[in-house]
Amino acid sequence: MSRINNITRAIFALLFLLFVAPLRADEVRVVSSSSSTARASDDQFELKVSKDLHFGGGRVTIDHRFGDLNVRTQSGSTVSVRAFIRSSHPDIGKSIRIVAEEEGNGVSIKTIFPEIHIHGGHVSYSVDMTVTIPPNAQLTAKNQFGETDIRGLRASSIIDNRQGSITFADARGGSHSVSNAFGGIDIVDVDGDLTVNNSNGAITVNNAGGRLTITNRFGSVTVDDAKRDVTIGNANGAITALDIGGSLKVTNAFGNVKAGTVNGTADITTTNAKVDLANIQGSAIVKNSFGSVVAQSVKGSFTADCENSKVDAANIGGNVKIDTAFGGVTLQNVGGLVDITTSNGNIKVMDSGAFTAETRFGSVRAERIRGSADIKGSNGGITLQEISGDVKVRTSFGAAFISGANGAIDVQNDNGAISVERLRAGGCKPIVLRTSFSSIRVTLPENAGYSVNARTSFGHIRSALPVTTTSAGDDSLVGTIGRGGCRLELSNSNGSITIERE
């Protein structure tokens, strides 16, 4: 029995040498081999390959396929290659080669598969590889059909995977490019400029120290804690960018955009998505359609060009300019000027600088405006309260109500009532009110001085304040209230005019 076993061992040894021969001694060093069938994948061939090469500087280039690729760093001048070849068919497993060579500009590592693998039928095979390189080595790593995990680099890198996830972590120095086609990308703690490209998979970046540029399709993008400028382009996936040390530029379609704590300007362009901005230290610029826009705490100016979008903004330090259609606008606490143009949507502004608005088929409401208010509207009511400057309104088919204005008032309405009250005392504040097919009501302080010229048709004129008339009739009243002097012109067609005492 012992003799048979010895013969058997000799036969296996001979077969072993024949299987390994195609790998060539100058390419690999065989550590161990096995023909165990106990693995879940029913591998009939397993082979471990190991090689160490001297690295004299330059770049390590890895061209790998059909298996996981791990790259780590360690001090010294050695590049170590450890590979594990597995195949369900021994002939194919024996034909897979790992070629590692020292070159004039670095080290090259390549996995070579036999041509037969293209026509291999139901045969399975893989090569998992771990490469250890010096920290200062530049790296080009390509992989297909496997996970890629690279950590600890201290020089520039180019990482490209076609089918499988990528993990890239703890990189310092130089610039880095990471690309994938079908699989997620997870990047953590990378210093230096970083470019990330993906086609079908999520991208996550945490703690990026340099400029960051991301391009994706069909997958979400999440950036948290980027020290410098960030540029993100996506097509079909949500984008989240938080704690951005520089400016942020986002282009997207069919995916919500959320940006918070941006130290520079936030420039967002998207369609069919919601945009949510918060704590922007610079200005915010948004272009959107078919999705709401929310902006909270923007230190600079805020500009929104939207279509079919509702816009809500609060705590804006600079000027605000909004152009939208088929969506309402709500603003609160704006430090600068406000300019809003919309159609088919209501406008509400509280606590802002001078206010200009133009709308159709929607109401306008403004309170506590530090400056003038200039409103053009139709088919909706207008309410203005506590306006410190002049008021100018042009509207139709909606009532205009003005209370607490501190400047001149000029309102022209068609088919809508006009009501003016609680005028602030001090100085001459001319009032000109014109409408048709509705009423005019103005309430004046008891000590006011106005030169009155009121005319109407098919309506009456009534004054609760004494008027020293120069001419009066059923449809006109000309004279003075108090000392006179300040212009009060009231004109109506098919409606009444009432002057009341405050």
Image: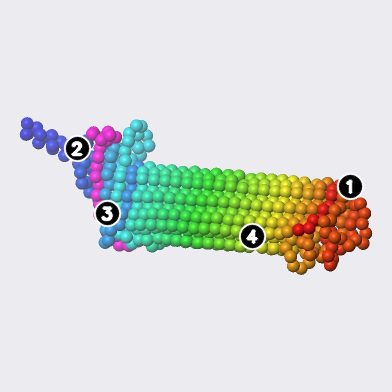
SS for callout 3: strand
Residue 205 on image: x %, y %? 43, 53
Q: Amino acid at mark 2?
A: Leu
**Residue 80's mark?**
3
Which residue occupies 42% across, 44% down? 183
- Distance, label 2 to label 1, CA atoms, is 116 Å
Residue range highlighted in magenta: 37-61
Visible in this render: residue 453? yes
Looking at the rendered image, the quarter that the N terminus falls into is: top left
Residue drawn where x is 19% and y is 37% of the image: 15
Three-letter code, disc 1: Phe
Instruction: Return the disc, 2 or 3, that comes first in the chain's sequence.
Output: 2
Query: What residue is shown with label 4?
Result: 352
Amino acid, disc 4: Ser
The percent position of residue 305, horizontal first and vertical second, equals 63, 52
Question: At which x and y percent is residue 9?
Answer: 13, 37
Mark 2 or 3: in front is: 3
Q: Which residue is mark 1?
A: 458
- Magenta stretch holds residue 387: no
Residue drawn where x is 28% and y is 56% of the image = 79
Contact between labelled residues 1 and 2, with CB atoms less than 8 Å apart? no
Q: Nearer the viewer, residue 157 or 234?
A: 234
Residue position for label 2: 15
Helix, strand or loop at mark 4:
strand
Instruction: Work out whether 94 lies above or below 177.
Output: above
